[in-house]
Image (cartoon, rainbow, N blue to C red):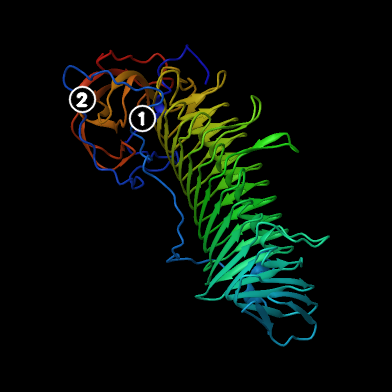
Amino acid sequence: MRNRLSILALLAVVALVATCCSVDSDNSGYPSMDNFPNQGMQPSNPGGMGPGGMQPGGMGGSDTSGNDLADFDISMNKTPLTSDTETIPTDENDESYEDYVEYSSFKEVVSIVYADGQATVSSLPEGVEAVVDGAGVIINSSAKGVGYELKGNSSNGYFKIYSEKKFQLTLNGVSLNNPTGAPINIQSGKRVFVTLADGTTNVLTDGSSYNKTEGEDMKGTFFSEGQLIFNGKGSLEVKGNYKHGIVSDDYIRFRSGTNIYVAASNGHGVKANDYVAIGGGVLNIEVSGTAKKGITSDGYVLVTGGRTTIITTGDGEYDADENDVSGAAGIKADAYFQMDGGQLNIKSTGAGGKGINTDGEIIINDGDIQVITTGKTYTYSNDLDSKAKGIKSDTDVTINGGTLKIKTMGGEGSEGLEAKGVMNLNGGEIEIASYDDCINSAGDLTISGGYIYAFATNNDAIDSNGDLYIKGGVIVALGASGAECAIDAAEGKNLYISGGTVIGVGGSNATYPASSSSQMSVAFTASLQAGSTLTLGNSSKGIVSFTINRNYQNGLYLISSPDLQNNTSYTIYSGSSVTGDNWHGLYDNPEVSNLGTELGTVTAQATAGGSNQMGPGGRP
């Protein structure tokens, strides 16, 4: 945090109120507030403010009271989806067309049954050879259009295949444990359709050490040199004890209908070289090793459907080869992460753990994302550490839609949403509670639409190290008291407000809107208690009403709304009686039956610097 003693009234702004008047301005393109996202919040009762003003609030920097996300949690969920549809491409030129088993034919089927420590293989078509050693099966195939079906149980079995052609592997109620290697070992660089037979349960487990073949990789319980496409309506449990759970040296695709659980104690849950694409199904992943990832890709990760739940519990670690430290993560992509639909739930409890972490861009167009981190910073030395982050990109973050709920309360450095480049928030619903900054951008930060709730206990609610542009949307930003802000632009940079509804509350070190802002704002300081409803209006009606959810002593309030007129005076009231729908305390079209106690007047201007200060009791 920077100490800028010069500006003392606006930043806490974005945190507290985000105006409640309608925002359906004529030509702005900003979202209407006629229909707030359903928060399940009851209309607030008037906060107890008598004529003598409020008692001084005891809001300290580490106060966590009033956190609307306090009870939010994440756990494994293997329940099948009631609706799990996907779009199957029909154009043969579509790059994913060949990944759909519907367009392939496997007329020859080899049946392999495991029982009593022995594997039995059915008659083989031309071009297919099998070597059976107890419950171990090795296939060599040069034939096209062949499928392999595995059934039965073995405590010492495996299936290994060398194939020159793509094939289908159907798991039809099979349970394989291989104490010395991978129970499924695909030494073929071709496409593999892994079909989970409808209604079946399939279990794969490896040992804690492998007997390896020279010149061959074997990196986890379910290993393939080629592409893996999971389909079907059965279930699969993969337990990794030696290294990873499901691994491809190419790419991995999960389709609708599947129900897959992966547990890895010493490696990553799902690992691919090229990419991981989740188009549907239920995917649950638990990893416990230090610095291990639920899903990791040397390329990108794309989520378009299904429900994915990931829990990591390992701490960070030092990598001597890279001379760097790394934390665990739900998802790690070296290229980029994109979400276009579906549900993604991630919880990371270890020191330095992250929800989503990418070297490249993060793009969220739609879908439902929930992230929790509980760990503190993992520190190796004074110069090397890994901080807990909800969603972090080493480049840019763009959010166009969807819903995001993030809680990162582990300790210093725990931030909600971070971009090391620029950040563009264009739509969707974003709710963040964090110990450190809720939203942090190393470059310019632009908010053009959507709903944003940011609650920080020890730092800024919204922090830009470049210029900060608010062009639309609904923003409720609650920063810590003291020297922290609701909305903070870097020293030498500016906050520009041209649209949207903004309410911020925080400490005294504030960034005011630049005088070139085209939308009017007001700023003032006041001491208010949790539960009090604040109204900005005139003698006849309220324009913006907001119920504060924690105490602020000499808190700095910033309010900006399209309904504020330049150089017009407005009155601040506390203890208002208000009903109506609200977004984290900010009312949509509030019905004010009693304005409450008058605190003072403020004048709306493009820049809110130099606005009124309320006295210790909240009165002018």
Query: Residue 597 occupies which quadrant of the picture?
Result: top left
Q: Position of residue 313 (x, y in %)?
A: 53, 45
Numbered disc in front, either 2 or 1: 1
Instruction: Tell me which numbered mark, 2 or 1, is placed earlier along the sequence.
Output: 1
Residue type at mark 2: give it: Ser
Residue ID for mark 2? 539
Q: Is residue 123 above or below residue 151?
A: below
Quadrant that contains the C terminus:
top left
Quick check: marks 2 and 1 in contact, CB under 8 Å? no
Disc on res. 16: 1
- Between 174 and 434, the residue placed more toward the observer is 174
**525 or 307, nearer to the observer:** 307
Helix, strand, or loop for circle 1? helix
Q: Would you call the spot at circle 2 few (<14 residues within 10 Å), some (14-19), or many (20 or more)?
A: few
Residue 93, percent from left and from top:
69, 67
598 relative to 369, above or below: above
In the figure, is residue 492 to the left or right of 192? left
Q: Can you give x and y, in whole percent of width and height, for residue 609 in the image? A: 42, 16
Is disc 1 surrounded by few (<14), some (14 to 19) or many (20+) residues within 10 Å?
many
Q: Judge whether residue 480 can be spotted in this image.
A: yes
- Height in image: 603 above or below 183? above
Any part of residue 105 in sight: no
- Report x, y in % for residue 375: 51, 37
Q: Please state which of residues 96 and 29 is positioned toward the viewer in this rendering.
A: 96
